[in-house]
Image: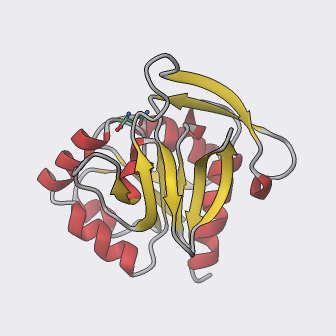
């Protein structure tokens, strides 16, 4: 299994490290030709308007969309979550729009720009997951077909729609590998043996 990590900006190396600790091979993706051999893609945190512009400039939007429509699983964290959303509140920025979710950017306001908390994520087991939020978004609406995987207080911060997985926090910044392992299990379920 080879997992590509979009490497235009943001925390891509940390995702590679976490995935490799889970035993899968990774590669950095900056151009369309690098997408052909991957079984799945991670879109890391960063800054989503910049990432959207870079994705257009590097002509990655259409190739990623084509592969996603053909069944490629994608995991987006933080800015990556924003990139997967169909709707962004108060913004017309470019996204891939693959998930039927509405998102509020920088949703936690200035006073709590960044924080850590324990999240209960039942699909990962009973043990709570320590989650790092950095100028994080949250999900304000989900359509039918989207499974909510975790709340932080009453806000949706982790969700899945078939092969697309998003987290508002940064699982690549802690040593807990369960979010990455969960994504790998989704890829394995989609990839013929
Ligand atoms: N605030 C950023 C954005 O809106 C996301 C922050 C992150 O990825 N850590 O794009």
Q: How many marks?
A: 0
Q: Position of residue 130 (x, y in %)?
A: 71, 32
115 is higher (above) or lower (below) than 34? above
- x 30%, y 76%: residue: 66
Residue 3 seen by the camera: yes
Q: Quick check: 43 above or below 96?
A: above
Q: What residue do we see at 25% from left, 69% from top? A: 63
Nearer-the-camera pick, 65 or 88 = 88
Question: Residue 167: x, y in percent?
Answer: 55, 48
How did the renderer colour the structure? secondary structure
At 30% from the left edge and 66% from the top edge, which residue is drawn? 64
Classify residue 93 as left or right of residue 103. Answer: left
Q: Nearer the viewer, residue 7 or 155?
A: 155
Residue 8 position within the rendered picture, expressed as x and y whole percent measured from the top left: 27, 42
Quadrant for ligand 1 reads top left
Could you tell me which residue is drawn at 54 percent across and 65 percent down?
A: 1
Position of 146 with respect to 55 (left or right) is: right
Q: Residue furthest left?
A: 57
Q: Is residue 43 visible?
A: no
Q: Quadrant of the C terminus?
A: bottom right
């Amino acid at each position: 299994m080879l997992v590509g990590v979009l490497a235009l900006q943001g925390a891509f190396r940390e995702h590679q490290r976490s995935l490799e600790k889970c035993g899968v091979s990774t590669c950095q993706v900056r151009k369309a030709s690098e997408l052909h051999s991957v079984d799945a893609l991670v879109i890391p945190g960063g800054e989503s308007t910049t990432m959207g512009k870079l994705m257009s400039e590097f002509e990655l939007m259409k190739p990623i969309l084509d592969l996603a429509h053909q069944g490629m699983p994608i995991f987006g964290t933080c800015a990556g979550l924003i990139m997967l959303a169909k709707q962004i509140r108060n913004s017309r920025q470019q996204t891939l729009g693959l998930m039927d979710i509405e998102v509020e950017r920088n949703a936690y306001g200035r006073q709590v720009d960044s924080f850590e908390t324990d999240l209960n994520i039942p699909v990962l087991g009973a043990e709570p997951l320590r989650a790092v939020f950095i100028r994080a978004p949250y999900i304000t609406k989900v359509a039918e077909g989207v499974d909510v995987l975790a709340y932080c207080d009453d806000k949706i911060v982790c969700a899945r729609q078939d092969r697309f997985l998003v987290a508002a926090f940064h699982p690549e910044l802690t040593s807990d590998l369960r979010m990455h392992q969960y994504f790998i299990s989704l890829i394995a379920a989609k990839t013929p043996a």
